[in-house]
Image (cartoon, grey):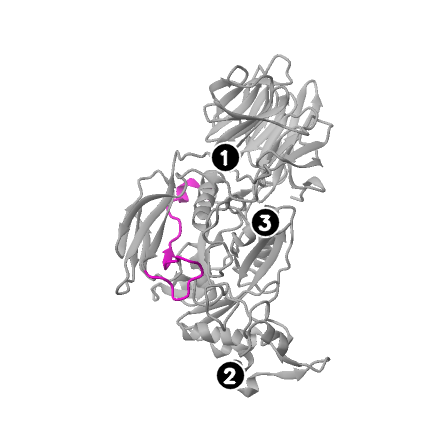
Amino acid sequence: MSTPRPFVVLVAVLSLACLSTAQAPRWWKGNLHTHSLWSDGNDFPESIAAWYHEHGWQFLAFTEHNVIADHERWMKVDDVIRRGGRTALGDCKARFGEDWVELREGKDGKAEVRLKQLGEFRGRFEEPGRFLLIQAEEITDGFEKRPIHINATNLASVIKPRGGSSVQRTMDRNLAAVAAQAASLQRTIVPHLNHPNFGWGVTAEDLAAVLRERFFEVFNGHPAVGHEGDAQHAGLEKLWDIACTLRIDRFKAPPPYGLATDDSHEYFVQHQSKSNVGRGWVVVRSVELATQSLLDAMLRGEFYASSGVTLRDVRFADGELVVEVEPVAGETYRIAFVGTREGYDETATPVVGEDGKALAATWRYSDDVGAVLASAEGPRAAYRLRGDELYVRAIVTSSAVPANPSFAGQRQQAWTQPVGWQRRVAQVPLEFGAVDCGGTWRGELRGIDVDHGGAIYWSFTRDLVRSDAEGRVVCSVAIEGGIGDLCVQDGKVFALGLDASGQGADRVLVRDARTLAAIGEHALIGERGMNGAARAITWQGGRFWVVGGEPLAVHVFDEGFGLVSRRELANAPEGLRVACFGDQRFWFGGASGTRSVLCTDAALQPWASVPGDVAHGLASISGGRFLVGVSVPLGDGRFAGKAHVAEASPSGGLRALAD
């Protein structure tokens, strides 16, 4: 048995200077997403740094695609021009002198220019308390046709894309590589997810489920990032609120913080259709302009994101969030406080295409998620939390249009970070590992689930068991009638109560998740329910999904077990008895020995039938990973249980992961 370990998202080395009482924190403005000729930008990095230095930014990170500027590199001058940098070479010479620019004749006889390394030009700009350059990288990866880009700020060496068997696995594997470098060097490295709507790459559910990711771009100045979404995809504001809500409520983990960035590539033509400078930035409250101090402050949420609005102050103390704008003459401001309250309507539905298949899109949620809790006109507003908010954040919108907007109808804005969530999350979110359930029990293991607060629930046919994440039994209760598959939701355990045959279920038993005390039960079979025995149960989108009946179908029930819909399940594995929703798909497992798992999309359209034995339980954890139950016969009708961690792929099925 292994011991669960805290997520090592970032390894922070506190700077003693940050603790000095001689320095009062102040605001520092910076951009953490910038491209130059080192990747797909069209200007020299030193010329780009000069623009930011001259226009009032205090820190800047170059984030080239899968490369950092730390080695010799030459580029054809013709290629610079083809990218749109027609005057780049001349401008660089005029700014830095003829001697600064190194040219040579390439093997093909064409002129080449040497690109400067970060270490060669940072000394021209960096000045204590005035300007800072930070080494970074845009880890550029993808799954199928969906782009997955993650910036790593303050890394020491290139991190190659890790790939993965899904969007969530790709994110998690790259973030794990960042964490590994941070741990090995005892160095703070802050990763953030870039432009989730670019190519519709990452959904709110993906962001929520990858607990290693603490930051993402709520605004990106590139015109092709889908900031407002479209008819089938949520805009970034809604995406953030859904991710915050799911992260806090379902995963008991801190919500993601939101950044604004330029993602600048094009420096010579200023237009809405171009990815230009000066569109998005973060403003960090820190005691000094130093990489460690800035990143430590960001980890504490001491920053806001902006596309034009400057805040004089934002503070959260004694249950009150106060926002003050640095007003500009002639502009008006609206400050909205946005959040999700306890008891929100959890109902959500997948977005389905004309072919009936689920799109790779954020589900549609109720207006309770990310509701406007209060708003005010003017440069100052305050919101006192009632106590039932999962989180609260503020959006400031100005009447002013940005000088160079990235989409039609844009107004200057600022975004503060979510507050008021701390008491609702685990101090350190757990990374579940392989685990043995303590004790021996009456009957084989029929199902497992987790509550993301550190508890695992085990259904041993005649014994319901709650253990901690290390497998130590916290409590158990005998169920003489027998139980099958189970799921955990909203502080309750919902276990299928077996019928006389012992193979199917005719009711759902409801138990308190903490004590396992009986709360009640719901009949499943009848005129308003199923026409045959239930075999598996899971929870997703504010609904119970129960598999059973004749022919085999998925029955969708509301929270009171009123039947909402029914849909036949094609290609179901023989002896189906386990259901799970995880990594944006449904998973249905057959009887022991069949080694068959049906995977469908969110609309129950078959995606793949893959090998894997999940007959004894399957639970989604985080980062696209699962806990797979294993039943261990001991003789005399007694069984032990254990679980291992797995990931899924359409080709390899459910693969065990090293703990």
Q: Disc 3 to disc 2, how far (Cα)?
A: 42 Å
Q: Residues within 10 Å of mark 3 (few under 14, many from 20)?
A: many
Q: Amino acid at mark 1?
A: Gly
Quadrant location, the N terminus: top right
Whether 475 is drawn above or below 178: the answer is above
Q: Residues within 10 Å of mark 1 (few under 14, many from 20)?
A: some
Stretch in magenta: 400-427
Q: Residue furthest bottom?
A: 98
The reply to whether residue 75 is in sight is: yes
Question: Does residue 312 appear left or right of residue 351 in this picture?
Answer: left
Question: Residue 427: percent from the left, percent from the top?
Answer: 46, 44
Question: Does residue 360 appear left or right of residue 327 in this picture?
Answer: right
Q: Are marks 3 and 2 in contact (CB under 8 Å)?
A: no
Question: Residue 516: percent from the left, percent from the top?
Answer: 50, 24
Q: Mark 3 or 2 closer to N-term?
A: 2
The residue under label 2 is: 96
Residue 172 bears which disc, if any? 3
Q: Mark 1 or 2 closer to N-term?
A: 2
Q: Amino acid at mark 3?
A: Asp
Q: Residue furthest top?
A: 500
Residue 541 bears which disc, if any? 1
Q: Residues within 10 Å of mark 2 (few under 14, many from 20)?
A: few
The reply to whether residue 122 is in sight is: no
Which residue is nearer to you in this view: 399 or 415? 399
Q: Mark 3 or 1 closer to N-term?
A: 3
Q: Disc 3 to disc 1, how far (Cα)?
A: 23 Å
Q: Disc 1 to disc 2, how far (Cα)?
A: 58 Å
Whether 154 is drawn above or below 464: the answer is below
Q: Nearer the viewer, mark 3 or mark 2?
A: 2
